[in-house]
Amino acid sequence: MKKIQIVIALLVLIMALALASQPKNNKLDYLVQSSYAGTSPAPDFPADVDWLNTDHALSLKELEGKIVLLDFWTYGCVNCMHIIPDLKRLEAKYANELVVIGVHSAKFDNEGNSENIRNIILRYGIKHPVINDKDFRVWRSYGARAWPTLVLIDPVGKVIGKHAGEGIYEIFDRVIAGAIEEFDAQGLIKTAAIEFKVEEARAQTPLLFPGKVLADSKSQRLFIADSNHNRIVITDFEGNVEVVIGSGQEALRDGDYSQAAFNRPQGLTLANDNILYVADTDNHAIRKIDLISQSVETIAGNGSQQYIRVQKAAAKDFALNTPWDVLFYDNLLYIAMAGQHQLWVYEPDSQVISAFAGTRREELKDAPLLQAGLNQPSGLTTDGEHIYFADSEASAIRYADIEPSGNVKTIVGTGLFDFGDIDGTANTVRLQHPLGVAYNQADGLLYFTDTYNSKIKVLNPESREVKSLFGSQAGWQDGKLGATKLYEPAGLSIANNKLYIADTNNHVIRVADLKTNELKTLVLLDNNNLLTANSQDDNNILRLKTQTIAVGEQAIELKINLPVGYKFNNIAPFSMHWQASNDLAEFFEDAEQTIVEPKFPLKFTVDLKEGKTILKGDLTIYYCEYESLGLCLIEPLQVELPLNVISESENSLKIEYSIPKPEDFNNF
């Protein structure tokens, strides 16, 4: 580990310079060559690295006859995120000739974990094989010097050239097309497909990688960025689902709640009670939701990403650069423009957007607002005097004065490569890629998600003291303070002395009571099936055969069988809600339950009238490994039981479901 840290430290200056120049399209030597053939042999992959998105380790020998594109990346890097759409376009255009290999060379310790990389593969829909290059062996063998770096290899295993930075599509489109033409003329291109077994999620969950959450004490509602379902979910503080905004399609489309479309939305903020602003991150846009007219409108952004070179512009149709969070204060909308390493501000009255803080250069530099250096800001909050922000890539918590003549100052955090998990004061503190921050007016403290440490921490902005509150290691466990577990939480909000946490990799919302120090999982109650209305996936619908039963009160017996090695416990409660397709069935109170450590079979009661009906159950099943609470799973299940109700019958109603073994889900 010490050797790796030394190598990374030596790369600090080089990477900083490379990132600063990333928006420029490098003019590479190989673009003007008369031949696209490589000149130096490409180093093969180490034999003992972890591979993801494939069921076997690959070698350059196996890839002979293909153009191979290596993408050196690390998953917290916004510049690496920017080229994912370009890679997908290239893969689609040259599906028969090109193989992309992701080489994940982690910056942060947390990013070197294969399970965490697997989550990111699912989160960003990456379909090509990925190497976990946590020891930088592939990185060093190819001379990579910055994230992202791309290396192109010809069909006979020689390096054509490499490129560092964004804006890759046009360059690689041209070179790949030229290489295919040249080598195909020699009969050296193999168009036969190579099959890779990509990672698959275990099951559909009510939320999917929720990025941010907003708690509004006035309306007693939660606004949840259900990021990978491409929608906004509104619930009450008890978890009852009230509204779903968005069709679920990955697109930029305005309209009413059912027509509108988002692309991995993140930050949320309320204005004047009835306007919700959204950082529609992968659409590179700001959306305005009118909660009265129930409509969605794009106020900035056009769906494309650009490196912004101006300081001010009319916001409508102006391309943005990965907005990650938004904050409405004093009739202004502040924007954490993560891809730009800046804070921006939008004026609703004039509809003008302008730079507020940051030079665009990625560095930890305190200075007057527009002379300061920021590092992928990803979370915003305010005390009325300062805009506090999570400066993620520098593992820092900082603030920008609201007064335009003010400054940017760092509270904790010391540099791009200074990270860890150390509580303390001022420069002794070490964090790891925090993404969310919230100011609590009740105590004057800042609460934040120390995301890659899977913890919630508290910061006194005056004394600069940081303490860990909730979380101990990546996992899922309710309880008190340090006995709890979260998994890369990315957002939080405060209301009524409670923290509402977007526990991103657990796909849930957690609630931390600051009075009792108790952390609980919020169970979403979707009584009207709003969360499934825009989903085409019915893998988790259990449709049973029609049963005949007698009229009157009937007891239904429900049994859930867990895989071997798993158990129900107090990590999170099991919940169920039953209803009928018509008025021929009326359920008793015991048909709606939330139970910690349920004992199966459960019994509940329904009163039936003669005729035909369908009983519909909405179940959420939480279970964990028996020996370790580090792996906890969710099994959302809808049950449909058709009934033929007659005057007399001796049949009883029994429902049994066995949850598949984890290995049935590709060992994820």
Image: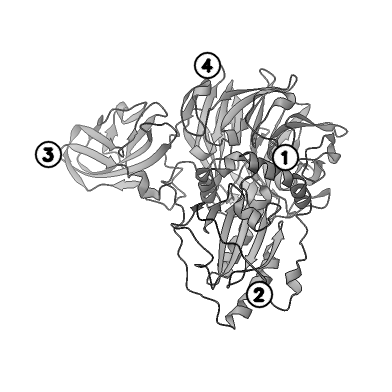
Q: Is residue 283 left or right of residue 543?
A: right
- Give the residue at mark 2: 37
- Give the residue at mark 3: 649
- Residue under the image location 49 percent in, 37 percent down: 506
Front position in the image: 541 or 77:
77
Percent from the top left, x then y, of residue 174?
Answer: 68, 72
- Residue under the image location 69 percent in, 78 percent down: 35
- Residue under the image location 50 percent in, 24 percent down: 519
Q: Is residue 116 left or right of residue 616?
A: right
- Give the residue at mark 4: 516
- Determine whether label 4 and label 3 are within 8 Å by CB: no
Tag 3: residue type?
Answer: Ser
Q: Secondary structure at mark 2?
A: loop
Cα gap from disc 4 to disc 2, whole angstroms: 66 Å
Tag 2: residue type?
Answer: Ala
Neighbours of disc 2 within 10 Å: few (<14), some (14-19), many (20+):
many
- Give the residue at mark 1: 416
Query: Considering only order in the chain, which callout, 4 or 1, is on the residue closer to the N terminus?
Result: 1
Query: Considering only order in the chain, which callout, 3 or 4, is on the residue closer to the N terminus?
Result: 4
Q: Nearer the viewer, mark 3 or mark 2?
A: 2
